[in-house]
Image (cartoon, rainbow, N blue to C red):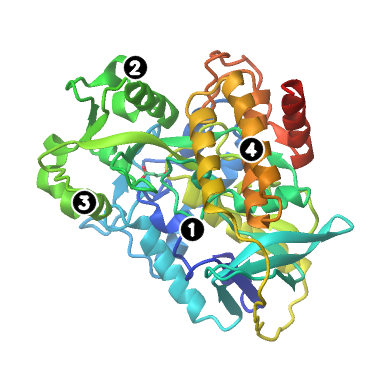
Amino acid sequence: YAALHLSPRPVVIISPESLGEGASSAWAQGGIAAAMDTADSAQSHAADTVKAGDGTVDPKIADLVTQEARAHILNLTALGTPFDRTENGDYVMSREAAHSFARVVRVKGDQAGSEIMASLIERVRETPSIQVLEATMALDLEVSDGRVIGVAIESANGQRSAPVMLRGSAVLLAGGGSGGLYALTTNPPRIRGQVIGLAARAGAEIVDAEFVQFHPTAMDVGEDPAPLATEALRGEGAILTNDQGERFMQAIHPDAELAPRDIVARAIFAQSQAGRRPMLDTRDVLGEAVKTQFPAVAEACARNGIDPALEPIPVAAAAHYHMGGIATDAEGRASLGNLWVCGEAASTGLHGANRLASNGLLEALVFARICSVGIAAAVPATSAALIKIAFEDGGTPSDPEAIAELRQVMTANVGVVRDAAGLESALRKIAALEAANKSSVSFLNMTATATLITASALAREESRGAHCRSDFPDTLPGDTRRSRLTLNDAIIIRTKICEATR
Ligand code: SIN
């Protein structure tokens, strides 16, 4: 989206897989939150965003993003996204948790992410100023005098490759989050905090790292990643029960299944911990219609031998979205010069401690455009020759066993409910894994982000939004600070913990 806005300025896109594959955006089921109904308003959307974020949303950013939402939906429509429409031609709106209005625009039920990506990718492919380097992965940023001047990339097609440095006049990290650092996640397999990690290793400031959102209804069917059962199902009236047939959300929150996502995720987690299998029951409200109205959910059910018209879907809370990330200002600029960030890797201040459903794609769109405006103003409009890369043998790929261990540590100790002992143990294990895998830069990007999440979670001695400390269960009144750390700060915390137990 940013590259299209920058056209005809030459842009190179680095993408580990075929463009759009392996990207969380393409997996988004819910849609995009936007006040499209005349009875709704951007102010109401902003107020819901601030409320869900539990005290740490930047209200100016919430106003900015929600006011721009409508224009981006119209722009995506013009670019070819086939949003669902009513007979009158209005956008069909879904209801999701903690929204005071049905304001999530959707495509073919649960296909919003893949359809939006398909229309953008089609435009990108026909734009001559954009070169897409597929099967390449960003590893490192080159920094000179506090300004980013290059990106080191490696081959992402499985071959060992020595890094190649690409130099350009501006760098935009339009990257994913950190869900895949957890053993139980809804994120595509390659999304493991590498983008945040590479910026942190270059010295960029990271904000709100402890705020990781867990989705309450990942399907508990033994797949990695876990398929999502969209919150829009609960918006339609689907209920949560356990294997004893108990509907447990009504006793926990007046909005029951549509309580804020962090509350539902903790309730699901508590059920799982107690050995009572939590399940999402769509039978009464949707029956057979679930198969046509929610094709991605139906397909995942079919793959796993579940007929959602006849039986409830087993679910678990899984790492889904990182509210924290690379600190950016209202223009999408990071703390390093010449570096812009948008998408989940950024932390703009929109989401606070708990992202409101379907605000993720919206923020990505709004800040992609804002970043493109800033980049266009900062760099000369020149032309550029196509880049040709022949990777040479070299480099050290990440060890799959080390990744698996890191993911287990994060789920066990830095998950839905945390405490000091677990977080300290995680920091020691992350340090040990990092020491044993020093030569793999891609792994260092993962341990950098894991260290930042864990150190920030240890430093925040309260519970707020998605960050729940069993040893500090209260929310500190009036303490609405956002946590800001560089990787060096986080490593100091980690080293102290490691030395204390020697
Ligand atoms: C969902 O469809 O439940 C996920 C939407 C989101 O995470 O914004």
Q: Quadrant of ligand 1?
A: top left
Q: Which residue is mark 3?
A: 298
Q: Which residue is mark 2?
A: 252
What's the distance in space between the residues labelled 3 and 1, CA to CA? Answer: 29 Å
The reply to whether the residue tagged 3 has its Cβ within 8 angstroms of ligand 1 is no
Q: Which residue is mark 1?
A: 72
The answer to which of marks 4 and 1 sits earlier in the sequence is 1
Q: Is residue 279 above or below residue 326?
A: above
131 lies left or right of 220:
right
The answer to which of marks 2 and 4 sits earlier in the sequence is 2
| Residue at x 52% of width, y 70% of height | 157
| Residue at x 53% of width, y 41% of height | 405
The reply to whether the residue tagged 1 has its Cβ within 8 angstroms of ligand 1 is no
Q: Position of residue 151 (x, y in %)?
A: 72, 65
What's the distance in space between the residues labelled 3 and 4, CA to CA? Answer: 38 Å
What's the distance in space between the residues labelled 2 and 4, CA to CA? Answer: 35 Å
Q: Amino acid at mark 1?
A: His
Q: Which residue is mark 4?
A: 430
